[in-house]
Amino acid sequence: MKTTKAAKSTPVKPVAKKAAKKAAQKATAASGKATGVAKKATATIKKAAASKKAAPAKTVAKKAAPAKTAASKKAAPAKTVAKKVAPAQAAPKKAIVESHAALVRRARRINRELAEVYPYAHPELDFENPFQLVIATVLSAQTTDLRVNQTTPRLFAKYPTPEDLAAANPEEVEEILRPTGFFRAKTKSVIGLSKALAEDFGGEVPGRLEDLVKLPGVGRKTAFVVLGNAFGRPGITVDTHFGRLVRRWQWTDETDPDKVEAAVGALFPKSEWTMLSHHVIFHGRRICHARKPACGACPIAPLCPAYGEGETDPEKARKLLKYEKGGFPGQRLNPPQSYLDAGGIPAPPLGAG
């Protein structure tokens, strides 16, 4: 009986062990799965937490967006203004492609045309001698020739020579020169100039460029006015009118007066320089104005690359003409007879009418 029981109980132990192993394996797998689930749950929680932290930043960014919109709205009117201003800008000039020889021909033809329009062109400052001319030219800075011409009769009546003006009371000279503007600086210049003439040149105005530019208040422009009109020596006078017109005509694109003088001088014979200056300045004062050129009344319109910058309607353009071209007084109280013969009207004295 014992033997039989032993035989029957022997196979039970291996079965139990196998069952135990399987149970252990299942338990391990279950715990692994639980661990994986736990890890996944932890990762999900972390992601959720991170997304919750990032969410305010997105919200802030969304809230910040309107600020950009407001800034763009504020900037928008500036663009609108720029668009509105653009049409008021001057029309671009027509670029002329021409050889130097063609430029010389066109420039000289313009001068010939202007000579026919202004046969009476002359310096528009009243003077009787070189001393009066150099003083009047210095005074013409920052004012009109007309105002200078209305002021100098009183000045020269009281101080007719360099020696007289050199010894003048500055306060008395300032009172006379007050209508010309910047009268204190101009008083200092003309008294200093007169002293230099009296002490260094025997009371005579020198007839050489290198001597003239040494005088107080005298630059190249003033020197060439004096040389060309008081001594008959050729010179180009580059004032604001001259510089403006030669750039409009594309004779040069220089803005420095000395460079303009050199560039334009190279286009013409030296003998024509003085009258060329008068022709160009006359045209700039009467027809080719700075702000409203009378293009429709311009005799050299076919030769001008800037045609169209001003009024092109002939009737409207004629209303823009000045001085004798418009039937008005000129700038000189005592103009040349040729000017009067051409219909020019003398300017009135200071304080008249």
Image: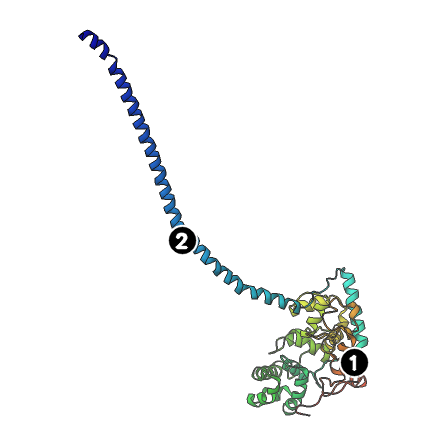
Mark 2 residue type: Pro
Residue 112 drawn at (x, y percent): 80, 72
Residue 77 drawn at (x, y percent): 56, 66
In the rendered structure, find residue 249 and report the number of the disc placed on it.
none
Front of the two marks 1 and 2: 2
- Circle 1 sits on which residue? 120
The residue at 25%/15% (across/down) is 12
Residue 89 drawn at (x, y percent): 66, 68
Query: In the visual, does 46 lie left or right of 313?
Result: left
> Of marks 1 and 2, which one's residue comes earlier in the chain?
2
- Helix, strand or loop under label 2: helix
Q: Is residue 56 above or below residue 173?
A: above
Comparing 292 with 44, the one in front is 44
> Can you tell which quarter of the image residue 123 is in?
bottom right
The residue at 53%/61% (across/down) is 72
Q: CA distance from mark 1 to mark 2?
A: 85 Å
> Can you tell which quarter of the image residue 78 is in?
bottom right
> Can you tell which quarter of the image residue 200 is in?
bottom right
The C terminus: image quadrant: bottom right
What is the image's colouring? rainbow
Residue 43 visible, this angle: yes
Task: Name the outermost residue toward the left.
Answer: 2
In the rendered structure, find residue 56 and report the number of the disc placed on it.
2
Residue 230 drawn at (x, y percent): 72, 80
- Helix, strand or loop under label 1: loop
Q: Few, some or many C-alpha atoms within 10 Å of disc 2 (few <14, some 14-19, many ≥20)?
A: few
Mark 1 residue type: Tyr
The residue at 36%/43% (across/down) is 46
Task: Name the outermost residue toward the front.
Answer: 1
